[in-house]
Image (cartoon, grey):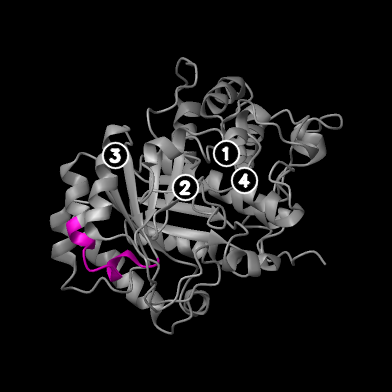
Amino acid sequence: MFRLTHFLKELKNPGISQPRRNPAGPVVIWNLVRRCNLRCKHCYSISGDVNFPGELSTDDVFAVMEDLKRFKVPALILSGGEPLLRPDIIEISKRSKEMGFYTALSTNGTLITPEWTPTLADVGYDYIGISFDGIGSTHDAFRGKQGAFEESLQALRACRDAGMKVGVRFTLTADNWEQLPALVNLVDQERVDKFYLSHLVYAGRGNKNRTDDATWHMTRLVMNYMIETAWQSLEKGENREFVTGNNDADGGFLYLWAKEKFPDKADQLRARLAEWGGNSSGVNVANIDNLGEVHPDTMWWQYSLGNVKKRPFSQIWQDTGDQIMAGLKRQPRDISGRCAPCNFFDICGGNTRMRALQLTGDPWAEDPACYLTDEEIGILPSERLTVTPFRRAFHVQRPV
């Protein structure tokens, strides 16, 4: 995850650069159940409204949590499918909090009725992320259910009014990129704590629909808008967080933006971005799916590193006998194509490996969704970055 607001704060008030330090254990995104009441166009787990056999029992989950705690995993992101369709989700969530994990819930929100809200508030989640793909009918079309937008919006309001920290999650595609300002405006109007923009990853239905991915041009406009919006929010003194995910070229793009706007502070920001280091799949981010299979992150469901029913997570995660894990943990990673000579490799870390794998069959090829130009990454002589302001170029047609 790219903590945009965090880095803009660093730009506003530069601190002392420190060597990069990795946490003791990875953040674990845990797909506790695969069943879902919606059918989203970009679902990486290809969930459906059916029961999937072989899922971990409550006792299985608790046993894994004990191992995760010993392994010093700091946070559990409880996800699905739709996690609220798992009958023991509250029991699991409470156990997670009691054990001291940072505990977040990732939900589509449609099941959070007024009856659910007090129960969720009683758990004390550190964060609840609710997914939106646009406003009104756009969201409904992405989610495959008429009325899904209103249901999720009511959930957002209910959680906020109950005192829970809540955020909006948005996956960027060519079909909804123009809705971003309206969605950010909704976040502002509804006094939402956090806005997360995810770039599309070619996994699950996201791979089947990868021709709907935003073009580089769209992505650049969107990211410029995100940076400007987050900066304005800071200038107003708002306590709102903007983050992005699944395209680590965002770090290089932010540096280039800062070089244009604040040239005297850009080098200090670059040092901070290098400390972050970009993509951390297989290092600081892990995934456990509903069957107990362990993956480098949530987009790697077709590749298992092992199963927690047969072997502790802590052992699986440290085993570099697996070629994928060895490659992901290598510092620096051995990535080919444009990544190899890129000036921002120390910031980006080679970006998202799944897109490279899906398009080329090679997990160590360049990420085709890197939207920085050859000039910007240093393959050709550098040129000043000029980004057309998003609002003024809002109706630019997708290039043919």
Q: Label 4 near label 1: C-beta < 8 Å?
A: no
First to last magenta residue range: 81-91
Q: Which residue is mark 2?
A: 306
The answer to whether one can see residue 331 in this image is yes
Camera-near label (2 vs 3) is 2
Q: Label 3 near label 4: C-beta < 8 Å?
A: no
Q: Earlier in the sequence, mark 2 or mark 3?
A: 3
Q: Earlier in the sequence, mark 1 or mark 4?
A: 1
Which residue is pictured at 53% across the width and 60% down the height?
Answer: 171
Q: Earlier in the sequence, mark 4 or mark 2?
A: 2
Question: Quick check: is 209 in the magenta stretch?
Answer: no
Q: Amino acid at mark 1?
A: Asp
Query: Separation of disc 4 and disc 2 at Cα?
Result: 21 Å
Q: Amino acid at mark 4?
A: Thr
* Image position of 8 (left or right of 199): left
Q: Earlier in the sequence, mark 3 or mark 1?
A: 3
Q: Which residue is mark 3?
A: 67
Instruction: Work out which quarter of the rendered image holds the C terminus and state it.
Output: bottom right
Mark 3 is surrounded, within 10 Å at the Cα level, by few (under 14), some (14 to 19) or many (20 or more) other residues, namely: some
Camera-near label (4 vs 3) is 3
Query: Separation of disc 3 and disc 1 at Cα?
Result: 21 Å
Q: Amino acid at mark 3?
A: Asp
Residue 299 in the image: state x and y as whole percent: 54, 54
Mark 2 is surrounded, within 10 Å at the Cα level, by few (under 14), some (14 to 19) or many (20 or more) other residues, namely: many
* Image position of 312 (left or right of 362): left
Mark 1 is surrounded, within 10 Å at the Cα level, by few (under 14), some (14 to 19) or many (20 or more) other residues, namely: few
Q: Helix, strand, or loop for circle 4?
A: loop
Query: Separation of disc 1 and disc 2 at Cα?
Result: 10 Å
Q: Label 2 near label 1: C-beta < 8 Å?
A: no
Q: Which residue is mark 4?
A: 352
